Image (cartoon, rainbow, N blue to C red):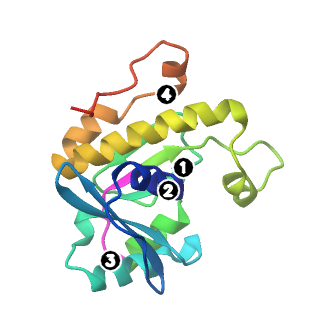
Amino acid sequence: MGFEWVDHLFETFSFGPIQHHRLYDLYPVRIEGREGRLLKPLTYMNLSGNAVMTFLQDTPIAAEHLLVVYDDVSLPIGKMRLRQEGSHGGHNGLRHILACAGHTQIPRLRIGVGAPPDGVALHDYVLAPFAPAEREIVEKVLENAAKAARMLLLENVQNAMAAFNGLDMRADMQGEAASGPDASN
């Protein structure tokens, strides 16, 4: 989900070519005049901290100004949770990033993918494509995750948390809930 989120934001807000580095690819974006960088680690997911720490050494950005975006099997598909800091919650990629950083004050956006069905290995489940019925929900989640990133960049993490935590795009697809704040103005 993290890579899909990067692709979605880059398609929407790109302002330059992808920059290839040894441990990561960097995607420059500009949102309402503010520049950001999206990073895709080229390491194994469980070693994502190596790419993130190399990026932080290459740029004058503090770890507290990052946003780590990743899939979460403990959240149902259609939900996302933004946090300013905290534990890794069992996610090995985030575990490695926090261990390399030496602290837990790194904002993160968890995007729900639901739990794997019985008998399906976790790594097979999270790497498999979404079912056609899920794809529409995933696209709505990515739109709202992009709006959350915009709010985080232009405002702050607390406003983004208040606006986006608790939204359920499954309900929205059934017409039962709002799709989230309109961040297009």
State the residue at coordinates (71%, 60%). 123
Q: Amino acid at mark 4?
A: Met
Comparing marks 3 and 2, which lies closer to the viewer? 2
- Given contact means CB atoms under 8 Å apart, are the residues at marks 3 and 2 in contact? no
The residue under the point 30% across, 79% down is: 56
Identified by mark 2, the residue type is Gly
Numbered disc in front, either 1 or 4: 4
Give the extent of the magenta segment. Answer: 101-109
Residue that label 1 marks: 72
How crowded pointer 3 is (Cα within 10 Å; few <14, some 14-19, many 20+) is rated as few
Find disc 3 in the rendering and name its residue. Answer: 102
Disc 3/disc 2 C-alpha distance (Å):
22 Å
Which residue carries the number 2 mark?
2
Residue 16: x %, y % from top left: 34, 66
| SS of the residue under disc 3 | loop
Q: List the residue tagged with mark 4.
A: 169
Please tell me whether mark 4 sits on a helix, a strand or a loop: helix
Amino acid type indicated by mark 3: Gly
Task: Find residue 3 and report its horizontal and vertical position in percent.
Answer: 52, 59
Residue 72 left/right relative to 184: right
